[in-house]
Image: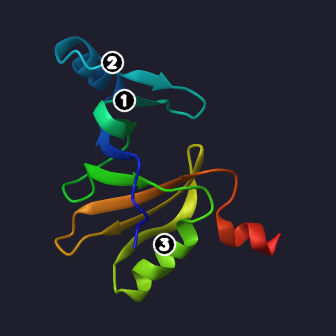
Amino acid sequence: MIPKPHKASIVLYVSDIVRTERFYRETLGIPVERQEGMEPFFLSAKLAQGLEMVFFQMPGKVGTTPALIFAVDEGGIDDIVERLVAAGVTIVTPVSEAPGGWSADFTDPDGFGLGLWQPGDKPRSLRTCT
């Protein structure tokens, strides 16, 4: 269903982004970077082989964080979500705007959070409508 992902992100919702930044950078030695441009800023850390950790300051609860997010090529997120719906997958958040693109969230059969992220200005279905 999801084209062979070339990149994946582990997304964590944290209560204190500055504390998180300090912990991962200073205590664990993971090079986190501030991503400015939205309030509040978020953090990202590129790991090996296309894996990235992303931290957002927002309420989270067990089952919603951490979440594994698969990056997809521009223009394909709508089709993938439609196929997931047809297969009976629970969609938590439909295709919506996200930093630098579009995202959609869904769960696996055990309720673990999974998602898709697509770069670009508009998802494919909106491009064909405008």
Is there any visible trace of residue 85 in the rendered image?
yes
- Whole-angstrom CA distance, mark 1 to mark 3, is 25 Å
- Residue at horizontal 16 percent and vertical 71 percent from the top: 110
Tell me residue 89's x, y (percent).
Answer: 34, 80
For residue 80, the mark is 3
Is there any visible trace of residue 52 in the rendered image?
no
Tell me residue 98's x, y (percent).
Answer: 55, 50
- Residue at which label 1 appears: 46
Whether residue 2 is situated above or below residue 27 in the rendered picture = below
11 to the left or right of 34: left
Pick whichever, 37 or 6, lies toward us.
6
24 to the left or right of 117: left
Can you tell which quarter of the image residue 106 is in?
Answer: bottom left
Mark 3 residue element: helix
Q: Earlier in the sequence, mark 2 or mark 3?
A: 2
Q: Quadrant of the N terminus?
A: bottom left
Mark 2 residue element: loop
